[in-house]
Image: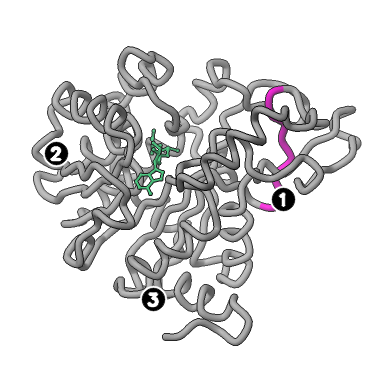
Amino acid sequence: MPDGIPLDDIFEAAIREYGAERETLRPLAEARYDTSIFPTTGQYDWFSGQALYCLVRHRKPEAVVEISTSSGYSTLFMGLALRKNGKGRVDTFEMNARSAAAAERNFRRWGVDPFIRVHVGDARRSASADTGRDPGILFLDSLHTEAFAAWFIERFVLPAPADTLFHMHDIMPPDARVRKFGGPPFPPPRPDRLLLRLKNRLRGRAPSDEELPPGEKNLFPPDASSPLPAYDGNDTTEARFGNRLAARIGPDDKAYCHHLADRFPALAPREYDGRVIGRLDRAGRPMEWNESLWTRCGPLAAAYRSEAPGGKPG
Ligand SMILES: C[S@@+](CC[C@H](N)C(=O)[O-])C[C@H]1O[C@@H](n2cnc3c(N)ncnc32)[C@H](O)[C@@H]1O
């Protein structure tokens, strides 16, 4: 625990101090599924977005690195917090030029463009040696593969100060029990989906479909609380990698928003559950999953180095 404060307590303090500003975020939640504003994939659940805003307010970072932007939804929570802080900048990366253009429109629309620099192109090439020097927050929500996450960790996490906060999106705690689009059971992937997945992999693009074949997901049979089978919500190799690393990190240095959400009723974390697309709880009711893992760069770097057989070079 580098700065001696459990991560849960950091969330607690951030939300206590800045949760009252949450109404300024509501227009984002209201517009979340409006494709004329956010035309491309991604996005962020209501509790996770509020917590992100509060963390940025609380930590007052000079620099944030976000990969990737998509239409700018998650970036906007950070941009609004930086504007209120009166300082700091997000360097955000997006390889899809159409998404990046939509994001830039949104940053102007919400008046946060002075606090955000958009880099268009493959982040693995467009991140200059200077990007993310001494960052306060590193935000990963991009190509959800283990290889991409490993690149991000090597490029940004290993050189970062131990207290820098790291975020991974689209990851659920291993004990989660949820359903998606009515499954499991999941139908076998359609052949055209398999082809698309292969093409995406060759082009180095984000998978447009779940990456793990249904048989490889962690499936759980019906239990006493629901007659339906469930799974842990982890669909990608990145999520599995993230959980392997998280298992090596102590409880005070990691926090899953899926667990945190219901501990902060003042943020009305369930307010937008009814609008969510495709996400269900174990009983089949709509649910925002809050698919975020937060940790710190010091413990994450140590976990990463010890994860590979023989350890990673320091
Ligand atoms: C899940 S979305 C990001 C969602 C976004 N954070 C939001 O709140 O809406 C993932 C994005 O990563 C982008 N992407 C994938 N690989 C990338 C790369 N190598 N460099 C930059 N962007 C990349 C995709 O184009 C896609 O827009």
- At 36% from the left and 60% from the top, the residue drawn is 165
Identify the amino acid type marked 2.
Answer: Arg
Identify the amino acid type marked 3.
Answer: Pro
- At 40% from the left and 21% from the top, the residue drawn is 32
Q: Where in the figure is residue 302, as x and y percent of width and height? A: 49, 78
Alpha carbon of mark 1 to alpha carbon of mark 2: how far?
37 Å
State yes or no: residue 175 in magenta: yes
Depicted 189 relative to depicted 177: above or below: above
Which SS type dominates the magenta stretch? loop
Tag 3 residue: 2
Q: Quadrant of the N terminus?
A: bottom left
Q: Where in the figure is residue 107, as x and y percent of width and height? A: 19, 29
Tag 3 secondary structure: loop
Q: Quadrant of ligand 1?
A: top left
- At 17% from the left and 65% from the top, the residue drawn is 130
Q: Which numbered mark, 3 or 1, is in the foreground of this view?
A: 1
First in sequence, mark 3 or 2: give its number. Answer: 3
Left or right of residue 106: residue 35: right
Q: Where in the figure is residue 210, as x and y percent of width and height? A: 63, 38
Q: Where in the figure is residue 304, as x and y percent of width and height? A: 51, 73
Q: Which region shows up in magenta?
A: 174-181
Tag 1 residue: 175
| Quadrant in which residue 208 is drawn | top right
Left or right of residue 226: residue 142: left
**Which disc is residue 282 wearing?**
none
First in sequence, mark 3 or 1: give its number. Answer: 3
Left or right of residue 104: residue 176: right
